[in-house]
Image (cartoon, rainbow, N blue to C red):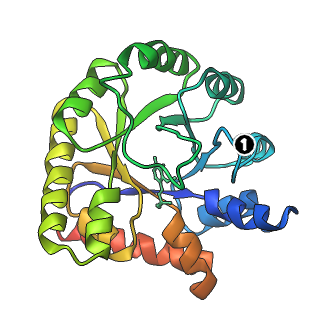
Amino acid sequence: MAERLRLGINIDHVATVRNARGGALPDPVRAAHLAIAAGADGITAHLREDRRHIRDADMERLARELTKPLNFEMGATDEMIALAERLGPHAACLVPEKREERTTEGGLDVVGQREHLAPRIARLKAAGCRVSLFIEPDKAPIAMAAELGAPVIELHTGSWCEALAHGEAEKAQAEFERLRSGAALGASLGLEVHAGHGLDFDSARRLARVPEFVEFNIGHFLVGEAIFIGLEAAIRQMRKAMDEGRAST
Ligand code: PXP
């Protein structure tokens, strides 16, 4: 059996709910502590250019207080890289970011942005961050991630999850195959392979069967599920789903 999968919890949408009222509650840092107590192996937070959910003060507190690794998700801008250099998170996950999008749509264009990314990846590595590139599960970006010297890739699971949600069986099968072969290619190139975006209990259980995946990063579904069963129970159930999937490899 492959190794136990790590579960990273993305707390962005706790901040989304807080910001809807403009006050201090619910506190995303409290959610991060609770997630760790419930078995999370790390915490992810995305400081977007427009600060629509996580804010600078949240990032500062997360970097200071967490007892498990912090994964700082960011656009590859000089502003964000300078912040990562100052805060020193365990990991930095580079994602594409467009101001108008509702969420991170599609992976980072590592092939087209190679010149832009190379020096920024080098800066993050020099600051001691484990750099991860959030990319589509295709050959060209995976090979480019290896060439750029990023130790980690996170494969975008959004298209697969959407196909599952819409009951598009054939498309879902093709998307799963893309993820499976992408994970195998990444691992064969010496990359650590993560996955994330849109995962729920069922899709996480299924994807855990692919042995090359080392970590899943999950947020929106769990924050939604927390409304019904509580965040701690939702995280424990996710942990169980991932362990069940992995046990059946
Ligand atoms: N990983 C990355 C790189 C992401 O951008 C996101 C979404 O912010 C996630 C994981 C988590 O996705 P979701 O909130 O849909 O679980």
Report the residue at 45% width, 16% height from top: 116
Observer able to see residue 211 = yes
Residue 25: image location, x then y, percent: 82, 67
Count of residue discs: 1
| Quarter of the figure with residue 240 | bottom left
Observer able to see residue 4 = no
Q: Nearer the viewer, residue 66 or 165?
A: 165
Q: Which residue is mark 1?
A: 59
Q: Which residue in the rendered view is the most extreme toward the front?
A: 100
Residue 98: image location, x then y, percent: 53, 40
Report the residue at 31% width, 38% height from top: 192
Relative to 85, residue 12 above or below: below
Relative to 98, residue 210 above or below: below
Report the residue at 42% width, 34% height from top: 132
Position of the N terminus by quadrant? bottom left
Q: Amino acid at mark 1?
A: Met
Report the residue at 53% width, 27% height from top: 76
| Quarter of the figure with residue 88 | top right
Residue 122: image location, x then y, percent: 47, 15
Image-based side of 231 in relation to 245, left or right = right
Residue 84: image location, x then y, percent: 64, 28
Image-based side of 49 in relation to 150, left or right = right
- Pointer 1 local density, CA inside 10 Å: few below 14, some 14–19, many at least 20: many
Q: Which residue in the rendered view is the most extreme toward the right?
A: 23
